[in-house]
Image (spheres, coloured by chain):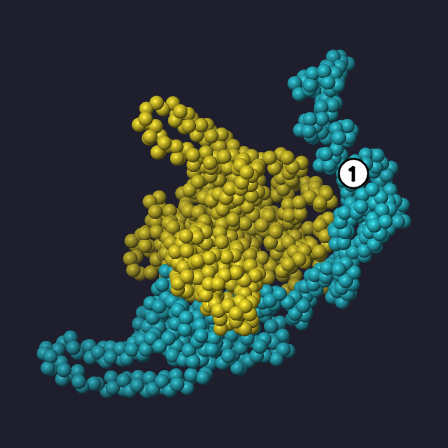
Chain colours: A yellow, B cyan
Amino acid sequence: MAAISSEGDLDFNQLKVLARDELIRTLESMPDSKDLVIEPKLMKILDRIAGAQLLRNHGASKIFKLELNSPKTDSGQRMYICRPTAENMKVIADHIKSDKQGGKKTSYTVALIPKKMYICEVIMEEEGVYGDVTFEECKLGLIPLDNDILSLELPEFFKSFYLHGDQSWISPIVNSLINLQVIFHKIPNISSQGRCAKMVLEMTKTIENLQGGVLGDPDHQIGHLFLIDREVDMVTPLCTQTTYEGLVDETFGINCGYCEFGKDVTGTDKNIKLLLNYEDDVFEEIRNRHITNVFSFLKAQAQHVQSGYMKGKNITQIGQMKDFVSNELKDLKQQSKSLTIHIGASEKILQQTTNEPDSKEHLQTEHAILEGIGYKDSFSFIEEKLDRQASASKTLRLMCLLSLTSNGLPSKDFKTLQSHFLQSYGYEHLLTLNNLRLCGLFTEQQSTEVSKLSMSDVQKLADKALKRTAFRAICKKWNLIPKDNVQLQNPSDMSYVFSGVYTPLICKLIEQTLMKSPSSTLEEVVKLLPGDNCTFTRTMSAKGKGSGAAKSSSKVVLVYFLGGCTFAEIAALRLLGAMKGYKFMFATTSIMNGNTLIDSMIDNGKGKS
Amino acid sequence: MSVRYSLKGDEEDEGYWNQKEKRQNFFDDADDENEIIDWTGTRIEEFTGSQVTSARGTNKNASFTKPSRPVEIANNFPKTGTNKEISSQSEPKPEQPKPTQTSASKSYHKKSASLTIGTKNLSKPTSSSASSLESAVKRDSKLSHTEVSKLYAEVTSLKRKLQSSERSRWDAPKVSDTIIRMVMGEPFSLEMYKSLPDKLTLLDSAIEYHDGNSITAIVLFLKKTLKNSIFISELRKRPVAINHYAVYLRSMGDEEVLASQLQILGRKEEAAMCRYRLTLQESSPQARYQSMKKCTDSYFEGSKILHRETVLLREQCSLLNKQILIEGADSKASRERKPPFADCPKEAELYFLPLITTLYYCCKYHFNQSQSSISSPESLVKEFNMSEKQYVMTAAKACANQRKWADLDTLLAPKKWIMKTKKPTVGFDRIVGILLKAKAPNDILQKYMLMMDDTTKRLETAKKYKIHSVVIETLKQMRDLRGLQNYRTEVTYGSSEDIQLQTLLKNTSIKWKT
C-alpha cells in the first residue's frame, strides 16, 4: 500500500477514499432512489468525505435533517443516517409510526455510524417497528480533518466516559486503531497512559489475537503510538490558548475543520464558512504562530498581494496580460480572500482582549494560578467575577484551574466559590458543580479524621494525597513552568502555546518518552499521573526481517488523544517534531477547548442530563 | 480503514474458520502456528484445544475456558438465533461475516480435505524413497498399525463431534464464544443461558473485555430474566455494570425510574441529585417549591455526604419562597399602577431568577425601602448572608443603569456600608467598570475615576476612554511633566481641559519628576 506521499508523510487521503467507499456501500445497500434523513451533527462529517453530489449519484433524491417530525415526502424508500443513540431511535420510531398512521407504505433503512449498538434494536423492538427497519452499519471511524489530524468527531465522548463511565465507545475507538494499522501496518512501539487508554489497549490486544496478528510488521509506516487519556492533563484545556488556530477555535469555534465567520470579520453583509486546513496557504503559515506574531505576517502578505495587483496594472503588452490573468490573478484573488478573513479574525481576537475591561486581568490571573503565586489575589478576582455575573463558562474555567493546580480547594474557599457561583447563576447549577466535582475538575480538599481510619485506608489516603499534590511536583520535575522568558516569535519551547507560562503536560510526557529520558525520572512523574502507564515494543514478525531497520518511518509518531485534544497541544507537538526531527500525526475523539469542555459539563436541569 | 476491513470481511471470515479448523486438527499438535505469542514476543503457551480462549484475551484462567467456537455453532446459529436475526439476515449485509450455509459447507469441505491430507501425509515418508510406482502403491496400500489406529481415533472423534453438534442445536453455546461474537459485533443470542453462573460469567467477561455495548446488553438480559432482588444484589457487586445500567435508563429518558433504581443499587447521592433534577422540571413556582422541599426532606436531609447540598437546597427553597412573596405583591402593585410601578410597569417575572438577579431587582424597585419590608435589598442580603461585595456591586449596577447618581453616592459613601469597615470592599476600578458599562456621563465617570487608588491603572483607563481631566489630574499627581506635555496633542485647543493643562504647565510650584 503506497500510503506515503512524497514528503514522507502519511497519506490520509487514503482514509478519505475508504470512508467515501464505505458511505457509497451504505447508500447502495438500499438500491434505487431514496430519501435521506441525516442527523444534523453528522452533516459536516459527511460534507468532509462526500458532499451532496455524491449522495445524489448514489440514489439520494431528497435530503432532510433528522427532526422530531417525519419529513413530508412520498418516496417509498427512506434511509436514516445517524449515530446509534436512544434519542435518534425514538425519533425514527415515531416517524415510522406516524407514517403508518397516515397510510404511507415506506421501507426504512437505518444506517448507524460507526456501529449498531444493542440499544438501537431494543428500542425498535419495544416501539413495535423492528420489522419495518433494516439496520445497516456505516463504519466511518477516523475522519481526516487535515494532513496530520484525524478525528472520530465524538465530542460527547469525554462526558460519557469520564462522567457516566459509559464504555460503549471503547469498541469504535479500538476498531479505528485496528483499521489504521491495516493501512499503515502494525505499529511496533506503543505507550499508553490512563484508564481509557488501558481499556483500548487491552481490547485491541484481544481482537488482534483473534485475528491472529499481534506481531510487529517491518513495513510499518508509523514508528510509535501514544494512547493518552484526556484525564491525564485537565489543566491544558482550561487554559486560554494563545496560538492563532487555538484562539480561532475558542473565539469562533471550529467544527469538523469548518469555521463560520460573522459579518464583523468578513467585512461583507454575509457570513462566510471557511475550511481551515493546510490547503489554505495563509492559514497554514499562521496557524501555529503566537497571536502576537500573526499580524506582522498578515501585513507583509497584504503588501505582497497589493504589489501583485500593481504589477497587473503596469502591464502594457497583451501577451503578458493574458499570462497574468490566467496564472497570477487567480492566486492573488484566492490569497486576498483568505487574507481578508484572517485579518478580520485576528483583529476581532485582539479587540476582545483590549475591549473587554477585565480580559487582561483574566489572563494575568490565569498565569498567576499556573505559576502558583498570589493565590489570594486570584481567589478574590474569581470571587468578584462571580459577583459581577461575568461570563459563567470563563469564570468556571478559572475556578477549575485554581482547584486543579492546588489539588482541590481548602474547604472554606471551596464553599465560598460554590455559593457565590450558585447565587449568581442560579442554584440549579448545583448539577453543573456536581458534574465538575465528579470529573475531578472542581473539588474540595478532603479533611479526614485520621484516628478513625484503618491501616489500608491510611495507605489509600496517602496514595491519594500523593496524586493530589501531584500538579506542583510534576511542574517542578519537568520544568513545565519555564523560569526564563520564552521566545514567542521564534519559539524553541513548547510552552509558547500558552505565552511561555505552561508546557502542556501530555506533550512533555511524549517528549520525555521519545527522548528516552532516564527511566527513573520518567517513572517518578508517571506514577503521579492518573491511570496506568504501559510501554512496550512488539516483536517483529519473521517475514522480511531486517529489511527496514532504522527507516524514516520510525520517526513517525501517532498520538491518539482519548477524550479530546486542543490545538495548543497539536501546535506544541508540531514544534517538538520540527526541532527533534519527528513527524507527529494526531488522532483524537474530537478537538476541544476550555469552552466546549465546560459547556459539556453545564447542566441546569433543562433538557437531558 | 473500515471499508477495507469489511470488504475483506468474507475472506477473512473464511480464513478465520480455517484457522480454527487447523487448530482442531489432530495431527498438528506440534505445529508452530499453534503457538500463542504475546505482543512482547514471549511464547505464552503451547496451543491445545482447551486453551483457545487465551488467544482471545487475557482471561486465561477464566472458568469458561474450553474448546471455543466449534464449527457446530456456525451451522447451528441461524436456528438458535431469534426471529429478528433471521429477518435481518434476509437483507443484504455484505460487511457482516455471516455464518450462512455457504461458509458452513465450506468448513465441512475443509474438514474432509484435512482428512485426505492426513492420509497423504501418512504415506509421505515412504513415497520419497520409492523406486517405482508399482512398488510405491504396494507399500502405501498397507497401513501400519499405528496409522490405522490413528485413523480410527479420528473417525471416533469426528463421530462424537457430529453427535454433539446435533445435540447442541438447542444447547447454549459456550459463554466465551458468545462474548466474542458480541464484542466483534456479530449476531448473538442470550436466550439459551438459563443458569445463574452462566449469566454472571457472561456479565463478568463482558466487563473484562471493557465493551460497554455488551455490558448493557447483558445487564438488560439479566434484568429481564432474574428476580429483582437477585438482579440488584449481583449488580451492586459490579459498579461498571451499574454505570451502564444507569446510562441505559438515562438514555431512555425516564429519570423517575433512574432515581429509584440508583437508590436501590446503593448510589444514594446520585439518586438524590436525580430527584433534585426532577423537581426542576416543575414549571409552576408553587409546585416547584413544594416538590423541592419534599425532595430535600426525604433524600438530602440527614445524609452526611450531602450535608452541603442540603444547605444549598434549603437556600434555593427560601429564595423561591421569597420570590413568590415579592412577585405577588409587586404584580398587584404593577397592575394598580402603584409605586414603584407608577410610571413604569414591571417587565418580567421574578420566578427562578438567580439570587444576585433578584437582589438587582430589589435594588431597582425597592432601593430605599425600610429593612423590615420583605422586598428591601437589605432584608434579602441579611436573609441569605450575602457579602458586602455582592451587595455593593449589584446595587451600584442598579443605580448606574437607572441614572440614580444620588443613590450611588450614598451607597458608596462609607457610612452606608452594612458592615462597618473603613476601607471600601469594592475597589473603585470595579465601580468605574460598572459605570463604563452603563455608559455613565463624563462628570460621573470623572468623579469616581479620581477615586481609583492605582494611578497607573487610572491613567490607562482614563486615556482609553478619553476622560481628559482625569488624565491631566493623574499626570499632575504623578508629577510627570513629559507626560503632560505630550498629552497636549490630545486635548482640543481652547477647551476647559486645555486651559487646565496650560495652567499646570505654567505652575512653577510643582516639583516635576526628572
Q: Is residue B307 visible?
A: no
- Reply above or below: B352 against A107: above
- Reply above or below: B148 against B510: below
Observer-nearest residue: B277 or B180?
Answer: B277
> Which residue appears at 59% of the width and 79% of the height?
B226
Observer-nearest residue: B196 or B46?
Answer: B196
Q: Position of residue B337 (x, y in %)?
A: 85, 46
> Which residue appears at 17% of the width and 82% of the height?
B140
Within-10-Å neighbours for mark 1: few <14, some 14–19, many 20+: few
Q: Quadrant of residue B444?
A: top right
Observer-nearest residue: B431 or B348?
Answer: B348
Q: Is residue A443 visible?
A: yes
Disc 1 residue type? Gln
Left or right of A477: which side holds A393? right
> What residue sits right under mark 1 in the picture?
B402
- Reply above or below: A502 against A108: above
Q: Position of residue B276 (x, y in %)?
A: 71, 62
Q: Quadrant of residue B440?
A: top right
- Reply above or below: A530 against B241: above
User: The N terminus of chain A lies in which quarter of the figure?
Assistant: bottom left
Q: Secondary structure at mark 1?
A: loop
Q: Position of residue A225 (x, y in %)?
A: 43, 54
User: The C terminus of chain A lies in which quarter of the figure?
Assistant: bottom right
Left or right of B441: which side holds A176? left
Q: Position of residue B2 (x, y in %)?
A: 40, 60
Chain containing mark 1 = B
Count every numbered label the image shows and give the total: 1
> Which residue appears at 59% of the width and 75% of the height?
B223
> Which residue appears at 69% of the width and 16% of the height?
B493
Left or right of B52: which side holds B331? right
Observer-nearest residue: A578 or A65?
Answer: A65
